[in-house]
Image (spheres, rainbow, N blue to C red):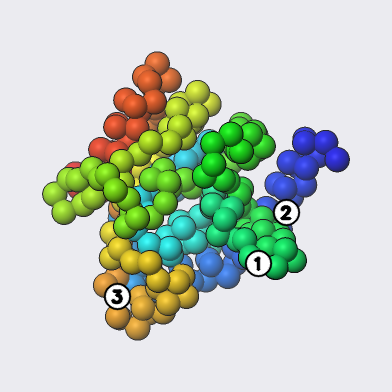
Amino acid sequence: MSFAAKTRLGILRGHCGAWTIGLFFGLIVLLLRFFGKLKIEGEKKLLITAKKGRVVIMSNHPSLVEAFLLPVILSPRHLFDLNFFFWSLPDGQLFSSKTNLVSRFRRSLFRLGRCIMISRSEGRNYLPIRQLYRILNSGENIVIHPEGGRTEKGSSFVQLKKRRLRKIESNATMLIARLGGVIIPVFVDKREELATVSSSVFGLFTGKQAPMVIHIGEPYRPDSKKNSTELNQELEQKILKAGLS
């Protein structure tokens, strides 16, 4: 099967995922919002911009749970318009297992949920990046956590008031600039922890954790004339300042 055919098949599976995994996590978003455990500030900006397509949410990564909730943060709209169901780029190692069959099942399940598996090893993301290009060029939207992992695991940070962010060193911002995409900086206000997704969600519902607040910043189009370091520094500040003005 050619790369183009595989990509089309992947996108089709992603559409099916809107009614399976997307429905499940979308329901969690709705319930958290209904009980006041999840708050979204600036949702209208995200809604208006996402309608146009070619949008990338660039967010900090304080815990595990936001990686599952941000792609369907506009729930239930994603069930009627898949531009509101953002693709995501999880680390492929998260789905590995000692049993090859289990690993393949996990990967297949998350591909249904519009995930593009990436590797943290240099030179091993050629096909995922090509798929990323295709998705953005087709007018769909993506969620990326540019810190390269959870904030807590970082060693070098950028800070603003009480907010902190791992220093961004990836080339994702440069990639988006070359594609002419729009970035929506997002700051997730949640206690940094390394718990499982289920325990984190349960903690929100039971009140063991403070409500999670998602601050939507101002959309902007990165300048392709800037180098990667300049683009990353600009993004760091925009994420930290999201929702402060």
Question: Which residue type does callout 3 highlight?
Answer: Gln
Indicate the position of residue 10 as horizontal and vertical percent values: 72, 48
- Left or right: 6 in relation to 151: right
Alpha-carbon span between mark 2 and mark 1: 26 Å
Against 183, is 33 above or below? below
Tell me, yes or no, if residue 229 can be seen here.
Answer: yes
Task: Say which element carries label 2.
Answer: helix
Alpha-carbon span between mark 2 and mark 3: 35 Å
- 10 Å neighbourhood of mark 3: few (<14), some, or many (≥20)? some
Task: Say which element carries label 3.
Answer: loop
Q: Residue furthest bottom?
A: 206
Q: Residue furthest left?
A: 161
**Nearer the camera: disc 2 or disc 1:** 1
What is the quadrant of the N terminus in the image?
top right
Dot label at residue 209: 3
Dot label at residue 2: none
Q: Residue at x 66, y 55 (%)?
A: 111
Indicate the position of residue 192 as horizontal and vertical percent values: 30, 63
Q: Are marks 2 and 3 in contact (CB under 8 Å)?
A: no
Lower position in the chain sequence, tag 2 or tag 1: 2
- 10 Å neighbourhood of mark 2: few (<14), some, or many (≥20)? some
- The residue that mark 2 highlights is 13
Lower position in the chain sequence, tag 3 or tag 1: 1
Q: Residue at x 83, y 36 (%)?
A: 2
Question: Which residue type does callout 1 highlight?
Answer: Lys
Q: Residue furthest top?
A: 225
Which quarter of the picture shows residue 156? top left
- The residue that mark 1 highlights is 98
Alpha-carbon span between mark 3 and mark 1: 33 Å
What is the quadrant of the C terminus in the image?
top left
Indicate the position of residue 88 as horizontal and vertical percent values: 54, 50
